[in-house]
Image (cartoon, grey):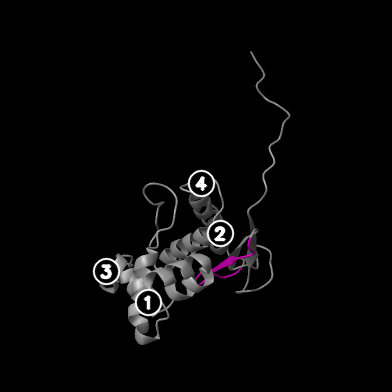
Amino acid sequence: MTDTTTNETTSRTAVAKHELIAAKGGEHVSIDTAVGIRYTDRSTNQTFEYLIPDAKAGTPLTMLALFGAKTKATNETSRVRNGKNGGVSNPVEEMEALDEVFGSISDGVWREKAEGGGGTRTDKSLLAAVLIELLGSNAKGTVEHYVKRFEDDVAYMRKVLKSDAGEEYRKRAGKVGPAVESLA
């Protein structure tokens, strides 16, 4: 019988800070008063917040949902980081992935990880084309201009995804929830 244990420990630097919150932008609170999560990328201080719809602080269902939301956020960002990026953090793609997965959850659609591993699931070129079309003469650049802007400024891309352009993009990309008629 051979002892294969060692006393060596491997130290990893945390890439994110996880907090429980009672309101958007609010302070970190205990699990029994929280109704949402905040995920902050330590390298860029970019944050993602998600408030659980209809959550009631202190209930078993909410506390379990908070645990699940924190776990889902960690799993999703790890999937992106360890997929095509080979373990290298890309906060823009990671935050985009959080927006997408929690947006789907809010629409009642649970998504498993994408085929083929990590990476973004937003077709930035399609999103840019939709944005340009909807902006019309107010557009300030080409598809390439907006794709670059999305890559450089994830907050801007999130804003676009939450706008009418995001709604139209999801329709064209086939990323829509169930038809309302199916919910009766």
The stretch in magenta equals 44-57
Q: Disc 3 to disc 4, how far (Cα)?
A: 37 Å
Q: Disc 2 to disc 1, how far (Cα)?
A: 23 Å
Q: Disc 2 to disc 3, how far (Cα)?
A: 36 Å
**Left or right of residue 81, residue 3 in this image:** right
Residue at the spot x=34%, y=72% of the render? 129
Q: Earlier in the sequence, mark 3 or mark 4?
A: 4
Crowdedness near tag 3: few (<14), some (14–19) or many (≥20) residues, C-alpha within 10 Å = few
Residue extending farthest to the bottom is: 137
> Are the residues at dot 1 and dot 4 in contact (C-beta closer than 8 Å)?
no
Name the element at disc 3: helix
- Asked if 51 appears above or below 79 in the picture, the reply is below
Three-letter code, disc 3: Ser
Three-letter code, disc 1: Leu
Q: Disc 1 to disc 4, how far (Cα)?
A: 30 Å
Q: Nearer the viewer, mark 1 or mark 4?
A: 1
Residue wearing tag 3: 182
Q: Disc 1 to disc 3, how far (Cα)?
A: 30 Å
Three-letter code, disc 2: Pro
Residue wearing tag 4: 82
Q: Earlier in the sequence, mark 1 or mark 3?
A: 1
- Asked if 140 appears above or below 153 in the picture, the reply is below
Q: Position of residue 104 (x, y in %)?
A: 41, 64
Along the line of sight, the residue nearer the viewer: 49 or 33 = 49
Residue wearing tag 1: 131
- Asked if 125 appears above or below 119 in the picture, the reply is below
Residue at the spot x=46%, y=48% of the render? 84
Q: Disc 2 to disc 4, how far (Cα)?
A: 12 Å
The dot on residue 91 is 2
Residue at the spot x=39%, y=65% of the render? 124
Name the element at disc 1: helix
Name the element at disc 2: helix
